[in-house]
Amino acid sequence: MDVLGHLAGGFAAALTPTNLLMAFVGSLLGTLVGVLPGLGPTAAIAILFPLTSVLNPAAAIIMLSGIYYGAMYGGSTTAILLNIPGEVASVPTCLDGYPMAQQGRGGVALGIAAIGSFVAGTFGVLVLTFFAPALADQALRFGPPEYFGLMLLAFTVVVSLSGASLARGLAMAMAGYLLALIGLGPATAEPRFIFGFQPLMSGVDLIPLVVGLFAVSEVFLGLEEARVAIAQKIHDVFPRWADLKEAMPAILRGTGIGFILGLLPGCAPGVTVFLAYDAEKKLARRPERFGRGAIEGVAAPESANNATSSAGFIPLLALGIPASAPLALLLGGLTVYGLQPGPLLFQKNPQFVWTIIASLYIGNVILLILNLPLVGMWVWLTRVPFGILGPAILLLSFVGAYSVRNSMLDVAVSLVFGFLGYWLRKYQWPLAPLLLAFILGPLLENNLIQSLSMSGGSPLIFVHRGLSLALIVGAVVLLATSLIIVRYTSRRVREATAEEMAL
Amino acid sequence: MIPFRIVRSSVGLLCALSLVLSAGAARADYPDRPIEIVVPFVAGGGTDLVARLVADYMGKKWTQPMLVVNKPGGGGVPGARSALKESRPDGYTMLIDIHTISSMLVGAQKTPPLTIADRKYAGRIVRDPMVFAVKADAPWKTFKEFSEWVKGHPAELVWASTGPAGPSRYTAFDWMTQIGVDPTKTRMVITPGAADAMAKLAGGHVVLAIHSVAEVQTMRDAGKIKVLAVLSPSRLKGLPDVPTAEEEGVVKGVRVQWWAAAAFPAATPDPIVKKWEAALSEMTKDPQFLASAQRLNMNIDYLNAADTRAFVDKEVAGYTEMATAIGIRR
């Protein structure tokens, strides 16, 4: 197959003024949407979905895809500058990005995030170009037992996110898991924990939870501290060569982890960024730097989430299986045009497919160009007095929370968790384990039930299948490693600073 | 104390206003403002696509925007409730109703959160039959052959079901009962949706998946799965070489299928519903509409309001009986 020839044709089509404009508009909108807490690519794509009836297929899909991966860029901006993650996938970025900003290295963090995202995104599209159908087939081999093993592995990350107190981390994880139980049970469709309150049948949604716990609580904290404006100055806007060298291994590792896991439709996108962050922490020579402004702590998650979003196109285009909600909408967009994903798509509509792939490359470049100079503009955001910024963030957060399911319950959830998050943060309870457990809980439960259904109730299925056994063993190993590292790091921190490590 | 002249002029103003407003309402033709079409499922899914096709056509016909609003979650019930019970019955909120939130729901629950009486149907739009899909390289060539195998090895049948009480389960139950297999001896794997089930089928983690035609189309075109039979009174134009389950001599009668209908809150005025009924009838004959539906592999099968109601009531009886027999009716 003359891949390069097709790709060249794709570029020719993608570089037409209309399609370039679509890519630009999509990327810009996506970045904007990513910056706003709660409002995510899903809502933006859903709102612009009717455009599919007026635009031609390539233009519409180029724009909608632009929104999708643009949002991954945008989420990191407020995470670093304001400690408010614009997306679920930006939560780990806050952990080290905001301390970096407080140290005056905000520009460096933003620059590394942009570069890492570009590297990861481009890598993802390169692999998509050459290996899409083959990789998609491999991804199908992951069945419920394998996903269970993978989620178990991801769960061990809770240990390193717990900060000083493992007990608190586990308690938060338990709370997160219990929250995820609210709603209809997957196996029985019986309501769980709704206490007779009908609207809770839909359960607590992830976005309002994130918005409440991180965005709303941050505003409350800021108002309490009587923040006037964010005091730090952004000195270096572009990262120095030394920073880049320091971050590059993390970028490459984050890309790898994000990409491989992004191929698996059953793995939620939020999971990959936590795993990438954790991997960096484990591999670092001095893990106690994490949580205090370690550049790898920004580079790895940011690369991972862009790699994941690029990888998500592979099962989408090759098999028609969406790995996340925005991709499901993109699939809907394809369907509206009568374009069936699958190998036949590559054969029947090659021009369309290659135009999209070419525009993914172009989109990555556009985003890099958009974001590096735009850092100055985002920095202006932090100069706005908090008395104005705070309420604005609150307003946007509530709108974002509502936009997920057009449900007022979600707004109430974000408010309630805003208060809860405020209290938890004041008293040093780690929020990240709660979030991770909330995401992983249903995945663990569904896959466990499905695995046991497949085996007729026998847990030996996990052992009989090589890949699932390997993943479960890996989870145990990773757990042991995490515990050792946590003990080691807190000892080092105590020795170095005579105070407890905080997260 | 408010001066009397101010009171008098305000009363006068109020009267004038109310006259203008009520006159306006009496004179305006329906629809005189945007209509909200509620889809209690995610955007991009089957129900959503039906809504968008309808919105597109009606929007052009009545030159009023038709807004598709997605309210997913909770199996579609909260979204449906908001459209049927929590909105004003003035004809400006419509629901795209499907079996899982209507006939199937009522059949499975003794006190369902929504009843058929809560709806006034304007008409049925789409009917999408269920098919039996297995992996492309599976050893069985015909549905009959497959059913024979299942009779002999029920414990080896690992099959995907969307939800614990979804259409897959009912279809499977109907089929298994008719071929004489005890469903509890088979291994049902509950999946959250069709896409997930298709991935499991193509990956060889389950042996059988029962879904609607539209849901299996992608994997079928990708050559990863094959369809052994379709549960429909007659062969489908889109699948001419797939026999019906009845032809294969395996399953008699069709009691489970995916369908979508336009529904309004029960108290909506009849003239409005009748207007929609006529418009839907016209829409389902329009060649452009049919062409767009064809591109989406949607099987347009119109029924007028009264027939739709009768169809749904019949389904309720069928699902009630099956749910009781399966033991899931509560």
Image (cartoon, helix red, strand yellow):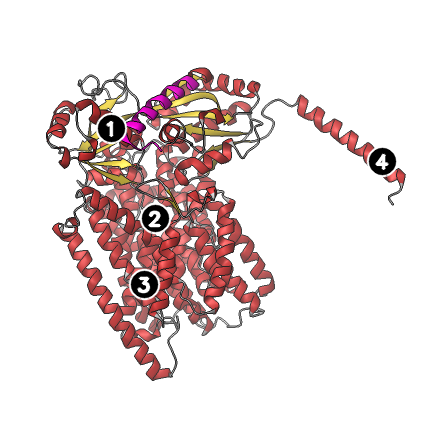
- Circle nearer the viewer, 3 or 1: 1
Give the percent coordinates (x, y) of residue B127. Answer: 35, 23
Residue under numbered circle 4 = B9
State the CA–CA distance, disc 2 to disc 1. 46 Å
From the viewer's perspective, tell me whether residue A287 is left or right of residue A53.
left
Confirm whether circles 3 and 1 share one chain. Answer: no
Does residue B208 sit above or below A151 in this rendering? above
Q: Name the residue under label 1.
A: B173
Q: Residue at x 35, y 53 (%)?
A: A439
Q: Give the range drawn in magenta.
A: B308-330
Which SS class for mark 1?
A: helix
Residue type, mark 1 in image:
Phe
Tell me the chief SS of the magenta region. helix
Task: Determine which residue is flagged by label 3.
Answer: A158
Of residue A346 and residue A446, the one placed in the foreground of this image is A446
> Mark 3 and mark 2: span between their CA atoms?
34 Å
Q: Say which of B122 and A191 sits in front.
A: A191
Label 3 is placed on what type of residue? Val
